[in-house]
Amino acid sequence: MTVLKRSGNTCAGERRHRLTGLLYRTAFASLLATSIPALLSSSALAAPIKINGAFTEHMVVQSGQPVVVYGTATPGEPIGVKLAEKKAVAITNEKGDWAATLEAIPAGGPYELQVVGAQEKLVVNDVMSGEVWLCSGQSNMLMSLKQAGLDAKTNEISTGDSSIRLLKVGFGMAKSPQKKLDAKWVILDRDNAANCAAIPFVFATELRKKLNTPIGIIVSASDGARCDSWISTGGLNKTAEGRSKLAGFEEQYEAYLAYREQKMSNQGEKTSDVESWDREADAVFRNGATAVPAPPGAALYNAMIAPLVPYTLRGVLWYQGEINITRPETYERYFTLLMHDWRRKWKQPHLPFLFVQLPPVGERLETPASVSKAARLRDAQTKAGLLPYTYMVSAVDTIDKSPAEWHGSDKQLIGKRLAQMALSTQYKKPMPFKGPSMEAVTLEGSKVRVRFRNATHGLTMKGDVLKGFAIAGDDKKLVWASSQIDGDSVLVWSNLVSKPSLVTYAWADNPDGNLYNGDDLPAIPFRSQVTHSNIQ
């Protein structure tokens, strides 16, 4: 637990550390000598040392990277920090903020975190050093094992030890960036895992099994949250489109608060009721309404992300986009803006983002779709995935029914795919994580050849007949096509189209495609023109 001790002038032996190459004792004693007289003459002396709410008993800090410990205290007060024999000193700035950076700490534990000021000492016990991932987005990232129907599989999924820890950030909005975080780390075991977010839990257990190191997952997500709600005001101000999301902020803020309070009072629902939002979002999708109410730009960032900066992370898991379905043409820009924004905030330009492409939704059509907002948003996600240090997991095969609802995706399968991606890209444990993606389209007479990347072990299909391809001529009227696997390519044709000019795969709200690579990963949906320049 966190213990507060008032100890007057604590002994110098408790505060030994280096500061820019000098011994901790010398540096801290010098700082106290110059700072305490000013503090004693100030009424601000009573201001207690506070450590950010992310630093609690059972916490996990990122191993192998400098660890930033931060909080608040009296302006000018020197703060000494010690964790696993690593020490650092910081001076509280004029706003009352301090941040001390410790050298990288080896994986393991439990350790004790000590934070020492002029007259106080904070101690946090049972601190582990391992791998820390921030999990954010919409309600699919929040859904618990129980809500996802996986609670009966908890014993199968769980590692059963105490090395996986969770910090769950509750819903909150704010008009400006906040420092306070009301949350605490908990140990995840088989007794309490059923209420943990399903995808982060599966992801963490897979990493734990392969890495044999403590795993910390920070879940900060909200039902019905647009992408721009998670971008800082400074980030949004970098583009004209982003600035438009800040227009009318006060009105949007108050309107969403009223909407959320009405839901709670009229229907007795909790603010994080993902099933309630699911019903509303699916109704919006089916009926073509403009949108369900959502937090305004930057509001969620201010309350649910800002307090976590600069807590050292290995990477980010992201599952979001359902509520952006009404304007898919803007999603690539907002998601790219978000990734740049968070990398700047954390001062980690290579901070990896592993994200989930949207699953099927709605009715499965008997004829090829010429218009599909869900397909367009998936395409925007595919394009955003081209940003360096960004990786996309396809969920296009995680629901196989009609009609499909957003929350019906297989959370265990998605969590495992994210873990495979992380293990391969971040931990040098090579394993397949990329599905086939369209590389080139060429005409061969009246047939179209689609060549795929990520088909080293060949292409395959699930079932007796390859499905999901459609082509069109100059009239742009899509028809289902015959298709045949040929090495790393698929030949596509139809007797109804003599001169194809357009080819699509799994291009629908609820696609019915069954193309995979030899690593059992699904092909990425696409839509491509076939121009005369492709003719060979």
Image (spheres, rainbow, N blue to C red):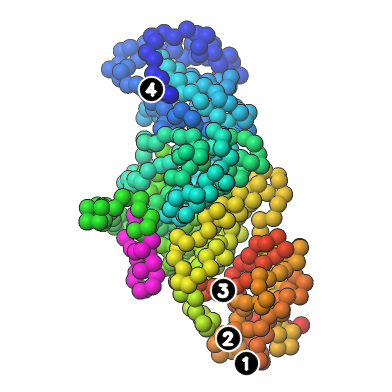
* Image height of 507 relative to 177, above or below: below
Q: Can residue 397 be seen in this view?
A: yes
Residue at 51% of width from left, 82% of height from top?
A: 366
Residue at 42% of width from left, 31% of height from top?
A: 52
Q: Are marks 1 and 3 in contact (CB under 8 Å)?
A: no
Near mark 4 (Cα within 10 A), the count class, few <14, some 14-19 or many ≥20, is many
Q: In which quarter of the image is residue 206?
A: top right
Q: Which of marks 1 and 3 is in front?
A: 3
Q: In which quarter of the image is the N terminus?
A: top left
**Magenta residues?**
278-297
Between 347 and 417, the one lying in front of the other is 417
Report helix, strand or loop for mark 3.
Answer: loop
* Image height of 8 relative to 18, above or below: above
Q: Are marks 4 and 3 in contact (CB under 8 Å)?
A: no
Q: Are marks 1 and 4 in contact (CB under 8 Å)?
A: no
* Residue highlighted by disc 2: 479
Q: Do the residues labelled 2 and 4 touch (CB within 8 Å)?
A: no
Whole-angstrom CA distance, mark 1 to mark 4, is 75 Å
* Dot placed on the residue nearer the N-terminal end, 2 or 4: 4
Answer whether residue 279 is magenta in the image.
yes
Amino acid type at image mark 4 = Ile
Residue at 47% of width from left, 54% of height from top?
A: 149
Between 485 and 31, the one lying in front of the other is 485
Amino acid type at image mark 3 = Asp
